[in-house]
Structure formats: C-alpha cells, structure tokens
C-alpha cells in the first residue's frame, strides 16, 4: 500500500511456539522483577475471563478512534499472534468490540491489546478470548485510516516490536524480545521456585525476617 499514511509490512515470526510457551505459567510480576522492574504497561487491563494473554506481537499503529487497519490486521495475522494496537491512548471511541473479538478468536489469534477503549465489555467478560484495553466507551470507531501494520509501536509507554512475545495477566503486560526470552524464562522460573519456598516457610512458621533489621542498620535508620 503506497498511499501516504498507510503502511503494511511483512510479518516475520522470530519466536517459535516452543519459546512462547515457556512463559505460559510465569507471573508477569516475577518477569518484571527479573527485567529490572522498568518495563511493561501499568494502565491496560484484561476484560476477559482468566486475565492471561500470551502470543507473538502483530503490531498496528492507528489514528485514535479509527480501526480500519485493525480490520486489515485481522485478515493478515496468523494463529498465535496477538494484535497489539497503538491507538494513542485516546479514550473517546472504541477500537474493537464483540464482533471483532469473535473474528479474532475464530481465526486462532492469541488475543488483542488496545491502547485505547473497547466496547461490548459485558459480552467480552463472559468469554475467554484475551482482550486487554485502556478503557471502555460506547462510542464506535471510524474506518478511514491512516495506519501502519508491523511497525514498532508504543502502548502505555511500552515499546513493542513486531514479533515480540506478549505476556499478560491481571497485573499488567510485558513485551519480551525473542533474543532474550530463553534466558529470561529460565531466570523467572528460578524466582518462582524461590517464592514457593518462601511461602512454604511462611506456612510452617519458619520465615527468617532478620534481613529487615540488617537493612535498616545499614541505612542508619536504627543502631
């Protein structure tokens, strides 16, 4: 597509299904901790049952309140993709609703993320197809463009590249580069193992809290 303001780039998967699957049971909070607590969204929330999302990013940048290129993405995205829409964070006109969600689910997509509003939330809330969004609006979208597909986007301050691994739960969303995903998943698994040990010790009444006093002494808070 050559018209100014419209771009559609070829989508190239760099994360294998096996690599994506490594994050299927990992908590976003623990992934965030391993990623130095500086990445991810804080204002986008799940609107579906279960609250989890996992797949490869198929990115869309669109004018606020317009979903023409999101419709194009529905035709182009592959099973296992998460359509990630940078709609500028504007909250007046919904980008998707029940019908587009149903199309995405039927095509085998892994979810939709919108930095903007959605509608038909009662229907979406009854289903398990993953939908994350910034807000809700009954006002429908326009279908004029412009927009771009498979370009680097920013949603709620998080940079997302086409093909990044998108993982989300009720705590928020993260975009993970396939280049670091394997090692990251290993480190997060170790964190989760450590947390299970801590919780077991709490239940058994054996938790050592001496580190609090040690830290306060080191900071000169207590003597």
Image (cartoon, rainbow, N blue to C red):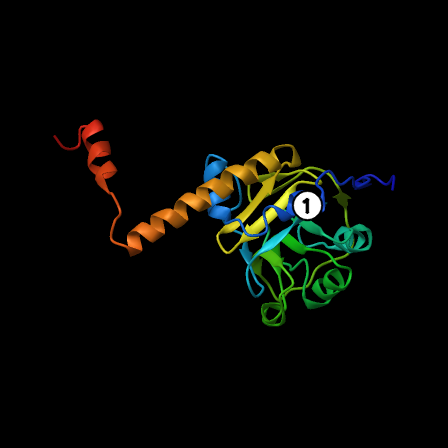
* Residue in front for this viewpoint, 107 or 212: 212
Vertical placement of 129 versus 65: above or below? Answer: below
Does 144 sit left or right of 120 as displayed? right
Q: Which residue is denoted by mark 1 in the rendering?
A: 18
Indicate the quadrant where residue 222 lies: top left
Question: Helix, strand or loop at disc 1?
Answer: helix
At 67% from the left and 38% from the top, the residue drawn is 161
Does 124 sit left or right of 148 as displayed? left
Residue 46, horizontal then vertical, whole percent: 55, 58
Any part of residue 19 in sight: yes
Residue 125, horizontal then vertical, whole percent: 58, 68
Residue 6, horizontal then vertical, whole percent: 80, 42
In the rendered image, the residue lying farthest to the left is 223
At 63% from the left and 59% from the top, the residue drawn is 130
Indicate the quadrant where residue 165 lies: top right
At 64% from the left and 59% from the top, the residue drawn is 93
At 59% from the left and 63% from the top, the residue drawn is 137
Quadrant where the image shows the N terminus:
top right
* Residue in front for this viewpoint, 39 or 5: 39
């Amino acid at each position: 597509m050559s018209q100014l303001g419209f771009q559609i780039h070829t989508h190239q998967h760099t994360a294998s299904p096996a690599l994506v699957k490594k994050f299927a049971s990992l908590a976003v909070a623990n992934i965030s901790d391993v990623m130095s607590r500086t990445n991810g969204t804080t204002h986008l929330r799940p609107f579906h049952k279960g609250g989890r999302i996992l797949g490869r990013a198929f990115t869309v940048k669109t004018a606020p309140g317009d979903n023409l290129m999101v419709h194009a993405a529905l035709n182009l995205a592959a099973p296992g993709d998460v359509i990630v829409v940078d709609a500028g964070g504007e909250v007046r006109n919904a980008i998707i609703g029940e019908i587009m969600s149903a199309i995405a689910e039927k095509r085998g997509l892994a979810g939709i993320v919108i930095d903007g509003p959605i509608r038909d939330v009662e229907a979406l809330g009854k289903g398990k197809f993953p939908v994350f969004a910034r807000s809700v609006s009954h006002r429908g979208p326009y279908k004029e463009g412009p927009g771009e597909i498979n370009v680097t986007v920013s949603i709620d301050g998080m940079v997302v590249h086409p093909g990044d691994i998108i993982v989300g739960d009720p705590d928020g969303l993260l975009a993970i580069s396939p280049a670091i995903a394997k090692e990251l998943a290993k480190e997060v698994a170790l964190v989760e193992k450590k947390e299970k040990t801590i919780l077991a010790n709490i239940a058994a009444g054996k938790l050592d809290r001496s580190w609090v006093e040690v830290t306060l002494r080191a900071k000169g808070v207590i003597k």
